[in-house]
Amino acid sequence: MNDKKLAILGASGHGKVVADLAEQLGYVVHFYDDAYPNKTMIEHWPIEGTFDDLLMLDSTQTDVAVAIGHNKTRQQKIALLLDKDFTIPTLIHPSAVVSQYAKLQHGCVVFAGAVVNAFADIGKGVIINSSAVVEHDCSIGDFSHICPNTALAGGVIVGTGCWLGIGSQVKQLVELGDYCLIGAGSTVLKNIPSHVTAFGSPAIVIRHHN
């Protein structure tokens, strides 16, 4: 049982799942969201203040999970929390399978049924969602989101801030550039450049973005 409370930033659907996971790991959870005080509860959990209120807490007594799905916003909030010396733990669901040889940096969340295999390298603030598979020797860049039931074959490289939609698949040794978006159900068979959206089977670039 943890003796620290876990402040969860983001009273959303994603926040609910993070809270459920955190409680299974022994944390007592408390929510913070900028909708406060107009919104004071999420399900049975109280919302205790805004992000500014969270920053005022004693960082030696409170860990923080940033339950924000938007990758760039999650990156910004984690940076501000680290500047205040908060610990951003990695949370791994008890039913997830994470190799002893995988490397996960701070702020990752690995949800139920996910698999992270040997020598995978997972960056800061990455979300590996329910039943996603990250195979051996993959590299996932900071603040990316691997959505539910996504499968990455061996040696895939995912850049910073990428979003891989639900049920997408990436062939072995393929590289995805920074901040790319892969549409739900897509099959990626070749490298995808940075700052694009790709969709389809096989996936093709359909638009460019910042």
Image (cartoon, rainbow, N blue to C red):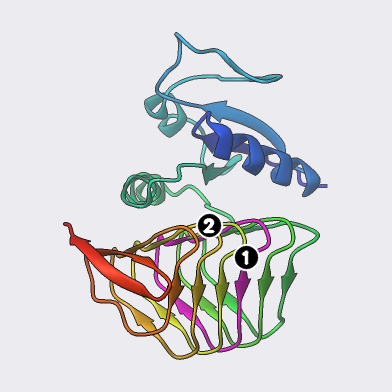
At x 45% / y 64%, what residue is drawn? 124
> Residue 113 in the image: x percent, y percent?
74, 61
Up-down relation of residue 102 to residue 162 (above or below) = below
Residue with the mark numbered 2 = 166
For badge 2, the amino acid type reads Ile
> Residue 153 in the image: x percent, y percent?
56, 84
Image quarter of the C terminus: bottom left
At x 35% / y 49%, what residue is drawn? 83
Name the chief secondary structure element in magenta.
loop
At x 79% / y 46%, what residue is drawn? 24
For badge 1, the amino acid type reads Ala
In this view, the mark in front (1 or 2): 2
Q: Secondary structure at mark 2?
A: loop
Name the residue nearer the viewer: 8 or 201.
201
**Residue lying furthest front in this view?**
201
**Residue lying furthest right in this view?**
1
Q: Which residues are magenta?
A: 126-145
At x 80% / y 61%, what residue is drawn? 95
Q: Is residue 69 magenta?
A: no
> Residue 78 in the image: x percent, y percent?
40, 49
Residue with the mark numbered 1 = 132
Compute the Cα span from label 1 to label 2: 9 Å
Q: Quadrant of residue 167?
A: bottom right
Q: Quadrant of residue 53?
A: top left
